[in-house]
Image (cartoon, rainbow, N blue to C red):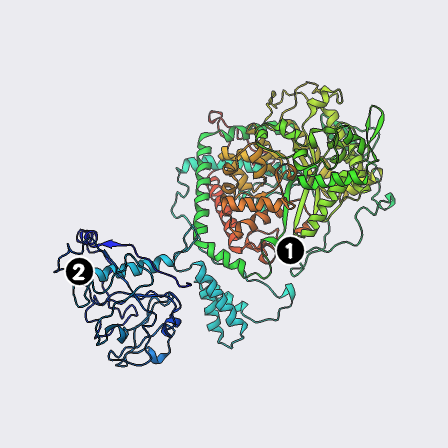
Amino acid sequence: MASAVAVFHRISYRKLVSWLLGQPRRMAPSRSWGSLGLPCSSSLCSTPADLLLLLLPGRRSQLCRGASPGPVWVLPPHCPTMRQSLSSRASAPLSLFWPLRSSDSLCSSSNGSTGGKMSSSSSTSSSNSDGQGKPKPKSPFHKRGSLQSTTSPDLSGVSGPKTLKPQRSLPGTPVSLTHYPIDLRTSMEEKYKEIAEELFTRSMAESEMRSAPYEFPEDSPIEQLEERRHRLERQISQDIKLEPEILLRAKQDFMKIDSAADLELMKEASVDTVDDGFKEREMPMEREYQRVSISGEEKCGVPFTDLVDAAKCVVKALFIREKYIKRSMQSFCKTTAHSLQDLGMKPVDVGVYDDIPETPVDADAPVHPPVSDTHPYDNQDPKNMPADTGYGCKMVDGVVHVYTKKVNMDKSSELDLLYPDLKEYIADMNVMMALIINGPVKSFCYRRLQYLSSKYQMHILLNEMKELAAQKKVPHRDFYNIRKVDTHIHASSCMNQKHLLRFIKRAMKKYPEEIVHIERGRGQTLKEVFESMNLTAFDLSVDTLDMHADRNTFHRFDKFNAKYNPIGESILREIFIKTDNHIEGKYFAHIVKEVMADLEESKYQNSELRLSIYGRSRDEWDKLAQWAVKHRVYSDNVRWLVQVPRLFDVYHTKKQLANFQEMLENIFMPLFEVSIDPRSHPELHLFLQHVVGFDSVDDESKPEHHIFNLDSPLPANWTEEDNPPYSYYLYYTYANMTVLNHLRRRRGFHTFVLRPHCGEAGPIHHLVSGFMLSENISHGLLLRKAPVLQYLYYLAQIGIAMSPLSNNSLFLSYHRNPLMEYLSRGLMVSLSTDDPLQFHFTKEPLMEEYSIAAQVWKLSSCDMCELARNSVLMSGFSHKAKSYWLGPSYSREGPESNDIRRTNVPDIRVAYRSETLTEELHLIIHAVRTEELDAIDEEDSLTMGPLPGQR
């Protein structure tokens, strides 16, 4: 039987009466049944207790036609009185509802003696009034199948009461009318009425409860929002000629816009235009949203003197970063730079260079950049490359110096290419190290971070529905078709296990006799390599490869590195995922190109793959460039970063390197040579056009036995077996990159950035070096333990490429990952995959990363789109590409930088981030303005001397 059945629990008289007598009168207030839309006949319902409750198994329209297939349950119109003996009925269950036979019609087509008529909320206007012509009140339960009805004459016919035979016992044992005469009255009738009202009201409320585990305000639940949106769309689509004010009011009601400014903006945008592609679908900027502000003089919650001292330290740290970032021609946050300029400080002199001309992108340009008809590696003719400048270069104390002549390279002919010397860097490093352990500064920064978290939660509570509505108004755009960049992924592990397995099997079948390895002077074919392992293509499986990180790799970076070897054999790693081998990286090029093809097929996913330069020989750069150019490994969706493993101790032990300066020369001298004369390394010149920066990689948890200071040996004198510390590697990488950037900028070539692995594990000073020298970093997990550095990373908007799945297998469990905390506070974070070969299972590892993060942290669509936008902003793709992906104004400040048609990020979210950052900067800048930025005494354990060239 398709009909639904309402079940009420049994209630014995004894329990019910004792419970009712002991309860205060807190039941639902007595109301006339007319107010509930349930009018009763005067002849049948003479008292308020003569309650008629109808539980309909089918639609009420079916019931009104007398065609209900299931039982109809009604409360008897007369109930037994309390004057009768309760003991005779104490053991019998009380059934409040009685079944009607399906033949008993509840919807009489003609008026009987009662003169009543059955009506529903969908009845015509003629049935909405009683016998006297008075309109009946509208039922508050119109959403359900409640009946507004009087009782049928069949229930009180002249022949007397009829025994009702139920088809099913509800709520207990079937009871006939002979047990309870219908002419009895009870003193508990008011109680019964209240019980029935409360049960009915409660059942209505419970049936309308939403299934979501969180609650929305009653005035704007999702269901009502969707209903209003569809109603508005239908109204507009039907082209009803309404007054403009009426239509604007409908829009205003839908968006819950309260301000006159927004209403005026709606009027300006209400002009109907023909849908003419991307150009005509211009979205109005959302100017108004609910803001949270703090009033009063002391807004930060600390004494003003503590605020001034902490603000001085924070401003000093920001000036240090600005100096190093601008000298190396990396990007510094514009909002922060403008705030620092308000202090009257002189900007850092980085030299004057002509801007590289670029064709501006039109505001109505499509979201996809134009594709070139020619391959970028086609133009290999050295005659078409820039000419030689005649400069010379050599490395002095670990840093390359450029001279105007190739002979007699001395101080008189040296080019003035700025870079911070070692003494200056050590002094600034000491200032930063003392700053992050200063107690009052730590307390101040911790309070500000807690405030930022709370403010974000308040913003979400107030504006989440508005952000969602703004996203729904954007045609076509959603999370799947906005640009996302995998800002941290290694090329040697950019494929998943299944992809690599299929490629190995395909290579075994296609190239079995190809010589792929030299063993003891004799060439080995691919077939012989696998035969020496007693393996065939059929034997291979994902489990056999054993390249996925598991619980055994947690805090064991050595075991993780071993996972790069298929089947545990380093020879297979050399054959399949190396660029420099006997087959010149042929297999690796093929599999990387297949990954690129997958990215191009997805259209909206991009990657920045890391390729390794070890610094063991001078020709590594040429071999890498020849690998890329020969095999035409290129995609518009991919850019390269060059990672330098910190493995000097290993190479020195193997007698491959004599000192650390030799390693630096092998890394940087070819780059200076090709920048001076591109024709000397034509393939490298072409390859560098798609390289965006440098990365420094290795296990950060390795203990460091040396402290970098002025007593540290220079690179030419570093012949120790111990590995140089992290900051030593980073400084010399930064110094040489800075000189190289100035040289390349003079020549009109693009420059590089420094984006190292930083803060994944190890000591906290890694993050200090990253703050001073790097444009972006990868991981940054240790920021959760350093409130001062976390606050500085926020104020400077330093990009952090986070990989929660990678961290989950190596250093930090997923639920403890601070990504959501960083995002809520406003740090510039993005999601990345790191090593899909070890951590992911699907063909789209970046989407897998997003999906898991969304499930674990319950990210909204706006959160995910913001992460995707951050990934594009911190990526190394060209300014022109970002202009197409994010909009031509993406480099501006505030909501003007956002184009929701391309990013799907609401202007409300961008405005909130911008205004919050501006307020934080204003707080510390205003505190510093109260007095000069003086040096703090040594007693305060801080050395706060002014920067060179600044007052």
Residue 367 coordinates in the image, percent (x, y): 66, 57
Q: Is disc 1 placed on a helix, strand or loop?
A: loop
Q: Label 2 crowding class (10 Å Cα cut-off): few <14, some 14-19, many 20+?
A: some
Residue 557 coordinates in the image, percent (x, y): 61, 28
Residue 828 coordinates in the image, percent (x, y): 56, 43
Q: Nearer the viewer, residue 835 or 937?
A: 835
Residue 870 coordinates in the image, percent (x, y): 59, 47
Q: Is disc 2 placed on a helix, strand or loop?
A: loop
Q: Nearer the viewer, residue 607 or 592?
A: 592
Q: Label 1 crowding class (10 Å Cα cut-off): few <14, some 14-19, many 20+?
A: many
Q: Which quarter shows the C terminus?
A: top right
Amino acid at circle 1: Pro
Amino acid at circle 2: Met
Of the image marks 2 and 1, the number of the one nearer the N terminus:
2
Taking the spot 70% from the left edge, 48% from the top edge, the residue there is 598
Quadrant in which residue 673 is drawn: top right
Q: Which mark is residue 24?
A: none
Residue furthest to the top in view is 720
Q: Which mark is residue 188?
A: 2
Q: Nearer the viewer, residue 360 or 784?
A: 784
Q: Which mark is residue 888?
A: 1
Could one spot residue 208 in this view of the protein? yes
Contact (Cβ within 8 Å) of mark 2 with mark 1: no
Q: As drawn, is 69 to the left or to the right of 933?
A: left
